[in-house]
Amino acid sequence: MNIHFDIYGLITTTVKSLPYVSEGIPAGFPSPAADYIGDRIDLNEVLILSPGATYYARVRDYYLVEEELEQGDGILFDTRLAPRTGDLAFCEVCGERVLKYIRKRGRELWLLGGGTDDTLPVDGDTEARVLGVVTVVIKVRRFKRRRTRLIDRLPQKEQPALFERRAIRASYFPASDVPVAGLVDLNEELIPNPISTFFGKVRGISLIEDDIEDSDSVIVDRMLEPRWGDLAVCVTSEGFTMKYVEVHDDGEIWLMPGNKDYAPIRITGENERLIWGIVTHSIRQLRTKKGGIG
């Protein structure tokens, strides 16, 4: 079996609450004022739908272009949820653990590859099963430089043709005994500096080309020194926003917008406090709790 993911069980007993920026972030935060810091949240409580049936898989050498997943990123998959059409699923196909999209036809379950996935056989005799439904996609933003979306998601009108070309009939066997490499706590995995870390929701689509969408979440660490390629939360006269850090050969630091309609900002002695924190991870919840954050 090709080992594309390292799979871990989750420790959910330790609580580490983060300040939660309750107002939407217009590709940044609305204001640096403390009034915008709402409740404190715990990542385990917010992100894990089914404690005891949810696993964390860290990407080792797998790439899914539609979700822009790459090495070091992670997913949460739930073995208790029933799959629905459109779900992203953690699957085993021909002995290889991969990510596929779900399509249901009556009582039949089919797996659908992405727009660039043509490496697996796609006949009805293919041995395939769904191990769990992906509920959360976690992308590393630190040390990755700018992560721009390479392709657009497949247009709705093209999906039927792709389905006929690449669909795999699958069975659904949620595993209660998923083999794991160990145990992790999401708070430990994603928050090395809890005292200086905040959690907030993104509002708007000005960073959509960077695969940060409306209602995604970001983890922001105020203790980190900015480095070239970091995505920074910045304070401007209009509130908070997010920009990329560029350090030029002459030592000058510039804040570069994800949206080409906005001008770059040069950091000087007069505005050096412009950078409020560094985005370490972006989080997309594909399934959320009813009435919960997200």
Image: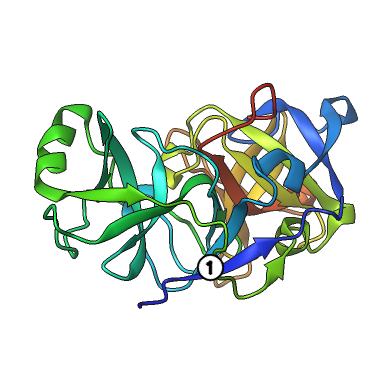
Q: Determine whether, in the image, residue 221 is placed left or right of residue 258.
A: right
Q: Is residue 246 at all visible to an observer of this figure? A: no
**In the image, residue 33 above or below residue 111:** above
- Side of 175 relative to 87 (left or right): right
- In the rendered image of this protein, does residue 242 appear above or below residue 261? below
Q: Quadrant of residue 200?
A: top right
Quarter of the view holding residue 109: top left
Residue shown at the point (90%, 54%) measured from the top left? 195
- Name the one closer to the observer, 182 or 232: 182
Residue reaching furthest top?
Answer: 291
For disc 1, the marked residue is 72
Task: Check the picture and name the quadrant holding the N terminus.
Answer: bottom left
Quadrant housing the C terminus: top right
Where's residue 155, x and y in %?
A: 22, 32
Which residue appears at 55% of the width and 72% of the height? 249
Between 176 and 239, the one lying in front of the other is: 176
Name the secondary structure under disc 1: loop
Residue 14, position as x, y percentages in the image? 86, 55
Q: Residue at x 63, y 69 (%)?
A: 251
Residue 190 rendering spot, x and y as whole percentages: 71, 59
